[in-house]
């Protein structure tokens, strides 16, 4: 039964530098890396050592808590270096790519029986494509989801256009969705598209819903909350549409080709366009020579939830967007660009700057300055305006800060992920880092309550 | 700087520097971009909204003074007289309160928080113009320490800082805070008809305990359309009272600024207003004494009701925090304001007591609102489990 949902709360941060709708195949990067931190909660156990050769799809490490969950190399090449940090934690595994890419061939994938399909996905290193709610981590392959939810679009600032990213991938998407129906084993599979989007599917067993509204309407957590909110003990497997297409391609070819269409965006990019590239690729392989300033930050992902704080980095495993924004580490004098200024350069969810009267079509060049210092909670009602859940966000955060597990459960911690708090973090007058507070709380609840 | 001899003073330096410059801090975790708003901007908006009350208050202090003396004076003379009375109050309130803030920031080693920017402006506006400056200083110091810093500073307080200062004054120095103190100058010199130096509420309070027409009638005559406390005078603010509270119009301009910029909660202001009207209307129905028969609209224009509604009840730290809680909190704030002023002639300024009381009740209101959310969630899980 398909339905239309309208998400009433939220905020579109209208940034400069949306990607033009044309795509190119990215050149092979000088270096790739697998970053275990992309997979929250996974403790990596290496299967390779420096100097080993790997193919596309060769398992590089597995999860200490479940050795079935393997993580595959996105490229074929040689393991150049295993970079470790404090306490010998593996930070990233650098891979020197081959000129000619070779694939691990998994042959014909059995996509009829859920058990054997899960086994093939795990062996091929494709299982990490799935994520789950609660906790926003890779699901246990044995878990019984109450539903599989696919978000068909991204609503984050400068997010890639779903129609464009999926064009030409219709058959892969269909194969992937069919596999999800098999995996769901009778439970519902939802495909949530943006209202008005061309993306559609006729796969039997898939419910297509349409969502309208501002960001975070594209967050899978918001969609789950609208369709059927999470309760304690329940699990929902989640994916995004491009990942489903990658899954479909794996099933039809037996090759784990993780290539996705990535939007290169942001005010500092000279030519913002789309690139077909692999996760783990060095970002400078597409940003090099394409940036207008020399004081910038390259983010893998969007400005709200993305990673990376330097000029370069690697494309995250789940990311399909790169954003380049100016660094804002210069003091701002109070009367000109500070808190007493007219504020014509400030985009704000509040109405304390005159910019809210400007037309919706105007876009903004914003920098990474926090625009103020961290304070205790003072202003109320701000988070509620951008948080489309039946949850009291400030009270949940306070329960997280005080580590009150019972209150966290009661107030709905199972329904949220850090990304759902990204807008709260953006609008916060007191500059409270709510995403990391929620992440720590989720980890604690996962350790203590499940 | 760390551990150095001048460590304590670093806070002062840091406070002044971050006041003048937005620090060059960039985001290191979470969202890479952040909203332009910060607490300084928010507080500045509230101070801006208070300026109409301040300017009108300055003029009205002079105006009331010259009218009471029966002397003619130009607008300039009136304003200058008021400014000479009011500006020292503002300076002393800021200086004494901020001194405590800097001291605590130095002891606790945190940066200076902005809460007092607003409190320091609110306090001079809710006291009589002739209040001795040393009393004002003591009340500011008392309220910053006892109402705020002992709880952990800005954002942690349970009671509104400005109202705590006023309550402190009210109970410690009642002779300077009630009775015939609301017109600046020596009350013995007042020659104008009806000017005793009392406020409208003080006059009305005299009607509660008696039905003697020789007392009640002259007082109620002042509230008729051509009287001193007519509804139009009360709306414009041409009546005696605390410095900044008299003009409903100036308060409404402030409310417009706060609502336009989204700083204050519309829920609180609207429900507070409705709560006050409701109580006044109920009193109209009962009509036991002359005070109860005052027209509801007229009733809410008098005293500090409007000022308390716009600037005190809306303090986000001490108000209820949930959307539903704000409506309940505001309604009972307004309701109790009128109830207290009519029932208890000793406390003509019911708003102060009502808002302080609701500050204490706000966490309880929120508790019940949040419990209903929790129950809804548990019920949903129970239905699925069944």
Image (cartoon, grey):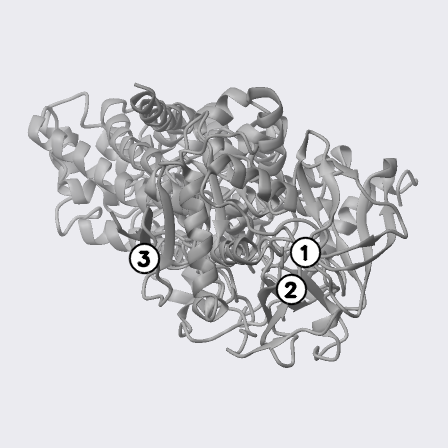
Residue B238 in view: no
Q: Disc 3 designates what residue?
A: A202
- Circle 2 marks a residue in which chain? A
Disc marking residue B19 = 1
Provide the secondary structure element on which disc 3 rests.
loop
In this rendering, which labeled residue sits more in front, label 3 or label 1?
Answer: 3
Please tell me how crowded label 1 is: few (under 14), some (14-19), or many (20+) other residues with Cα within 10 Å. some
Q: Disc 2 designates what residue?
A: A334
- Circle 1 marks a residue in which chain? B
Whether residue B165 is situated above or below residue B375 in the rendered picture: below
Whether residue A194 is situated above or below residue B314 in the rendered picture: below
Q: Are marks 2 and 1 on the same chain?
A: no
Whether residue A84 is situated above or below residue A255 in the rendered picture: above
Residue B334 in view: yes
Could you tell me how far apart the alpha carbons at marks 3 and 1 are, in whole angstroms? 60 Å
Q: Nearer the viewer, residue A359 or B344?
A: A359
- At which x and y percent is residue B29? 68, 49
- Circle 3 marks a residue in which chain? A
Return the disc, 3 or 2, that comes first in the chain's sequence: 3
Provide the secondary structure element on which disc 1 rests.
helix
In this rendering, which labeled residue sits more in front, label 3 or label 2?
Answer: 3
Q: Is residue B297 left or right of residue B356?
A: left
Please tell me how crowded label 3 is: few (under 14), some (14-19), or many (20+) other residues with Cα within 10 Å. few
Please tell me how crowded label 2 is: few (under 14), some (14-19), or many (20+) other residues with Cα within 10 Å. some
Verify CB contact (< 8 Å) between mark 2 and mark 1. Answer: yes
């Amino acid at each position: 039964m398909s339905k239309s949902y309208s998400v009433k709360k939220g905020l579109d941060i209208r940034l400069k530098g949306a990607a033009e709708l044309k795509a190119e195949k990215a050149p092979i990067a000088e270096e790739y890396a697998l970053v275990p931190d992309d997979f929250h909660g996974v403790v990596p156990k290496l299967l390779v050592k420096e100097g080993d050769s790997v193919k596309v799809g060769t398992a590089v490490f597995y999860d200490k808590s479940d050795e079935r969950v393997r993580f595959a190399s996105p490229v074929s090449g040689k393991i150049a270096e295993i970079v470790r940090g404090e306490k010998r934690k593996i930070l990233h595994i650098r891979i020197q790519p081959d000129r000619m890419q070779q694939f691990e061939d998994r042959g014909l994938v059995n996509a009829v029986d859920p058990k054997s399909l899960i086994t093939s996905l795990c062996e091929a290193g494709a299982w990490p494509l799935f994520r789950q709610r609660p906790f926003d981590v890779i699901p246990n392959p044995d878990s019984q989801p109450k539903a599989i939810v696919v978000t068909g679009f991204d609503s984050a600032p400068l997010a890639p256009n779903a129609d464009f990213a999926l064009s030409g991938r219709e058959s892969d998407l269909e194969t992937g969705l069919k596999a999800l129906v098999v995996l769901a084993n009778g439970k519902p599979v939802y495909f949530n598209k943006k209202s008005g989007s061309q993306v559609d599917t006729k796969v039997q067993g898939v419910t297509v819903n349409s969502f309208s509204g501002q960001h975070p309407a594209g967050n899978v957590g918001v969609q789950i909350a609208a369709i059927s909110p999470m309760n304690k003990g329940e699990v929902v497997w989640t994916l995004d549409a491009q990942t489903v297409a990658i899954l479909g391609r794996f099933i039809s070819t037996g090759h784990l080709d993780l290539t996705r269409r990535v939007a290169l965006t942001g005010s500092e990019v000279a030519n913002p366009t789309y690139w077909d590239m692999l996760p783990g690729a060095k970002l400078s392989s597409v940003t090099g020579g394409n940036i207008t300033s020399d004081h910038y930050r390259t983010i893998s992902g969007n400005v709200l939830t993305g990673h990376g704080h330097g000029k370069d980095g690697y494309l995250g495993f789940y990311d399909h967007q790169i954003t380049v924004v100016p660094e804002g580490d210069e003091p701002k004098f109070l009367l000109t660009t500070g808190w007493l200024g007219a504020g014509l350069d400030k985009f704000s969810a509040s109405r304390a700057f005159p910019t809210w009267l400007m037309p919706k079509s105007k876009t903004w060049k914003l920098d990474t300055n926090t625009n103020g210092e961290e304070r205790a909670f003072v202003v109320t009602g701000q988070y509620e305006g951008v948080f489309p859940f039946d949850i009291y966000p400030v009270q949940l955060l306070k329960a997280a800060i005080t580590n009150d597990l019972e209150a966290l459960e009661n107030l709905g911690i199972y329904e949220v992920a850090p990304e759902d708090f990204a807008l709260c973090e953006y609008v916060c007058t007191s500059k409270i880092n709510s995403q990391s507070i929620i992440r720590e709380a989720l980890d604690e609840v996962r350790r203590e309550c499940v | 700087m760390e551990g150095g001899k001048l460590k304590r003073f670093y806070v002062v330096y840091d406070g002044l520097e971050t006041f003048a410059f937005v620090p060059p801090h960039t985001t290191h975790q979470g969202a890479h971009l952040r909203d332009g708003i910060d607490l300084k901007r928010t507080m500045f908006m509230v101070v801006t909204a208070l300026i109409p009350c301040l300017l009108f208050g300055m003029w009205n202090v002079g105006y009331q003074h010259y009218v009471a003396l029966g002397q003619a004076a130009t607008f300039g003379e009136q304003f200058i007289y008021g400014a000479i009375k009011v500006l020292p109050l503002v300076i002393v309130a800021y200086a004494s309160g901020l001194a405590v803030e800097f001291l605590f920031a130095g002891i606790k080693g945190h940066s200076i928080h902005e809460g007092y920017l607003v409190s320091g402006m609110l306090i001079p506006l809710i006291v009589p113009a002739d209040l001795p400056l040393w009393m004002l200083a003591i009340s500011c110091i008392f309220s910053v320490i006892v109402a705020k810093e002992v709880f952990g500073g800005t954002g942690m307080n349970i009671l509104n800082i400005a109202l705590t200062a006023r309550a402190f004054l009210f109970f410690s120095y009642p002779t300077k805070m009630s009775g015939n103190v609301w017109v600046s100058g020596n009350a013995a010199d007042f020659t104008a008809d009806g000017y005793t130096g009392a406020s409208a509420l003080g006059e009305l309070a005299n009607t509660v305990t008696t039905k003697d027409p020789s007392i009640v009638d002259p007082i109620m005559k002042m509230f008729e359309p051509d009287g001193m406390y007519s509804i139009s005078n009360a709306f414009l603010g041409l009546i005696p009272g605390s410095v900044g509270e008299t003009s409903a119009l100036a308060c409404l301009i402030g409310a417009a600024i706060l609502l336009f910029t989204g700083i204050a909660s519309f829920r609180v202001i609207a429900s507070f207003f409705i709560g006050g009207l409701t109580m006044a209307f109920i009193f109209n129905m009962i009509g036991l004494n002359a005070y109860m028969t005052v027209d509801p609209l007229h009733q809410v224009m008098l005293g500090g009701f409007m000022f308390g509604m716009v600037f005190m009840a809306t303090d986000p730290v001490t108000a209820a925090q949930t959307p539903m809680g704000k409506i309940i909190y505001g309604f009972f704030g307004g309701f109790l304001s009128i109830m207290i002023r009519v029932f208890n002639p000793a406390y003509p300024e019911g708003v102060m007591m009502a808002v302080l009381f609701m500050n204490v009740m706000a966490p309880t209101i929120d508790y019940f609102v949040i419990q209903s959310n929790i129950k809804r969630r548990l019920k949903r899980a129970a239905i699925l489990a069944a």
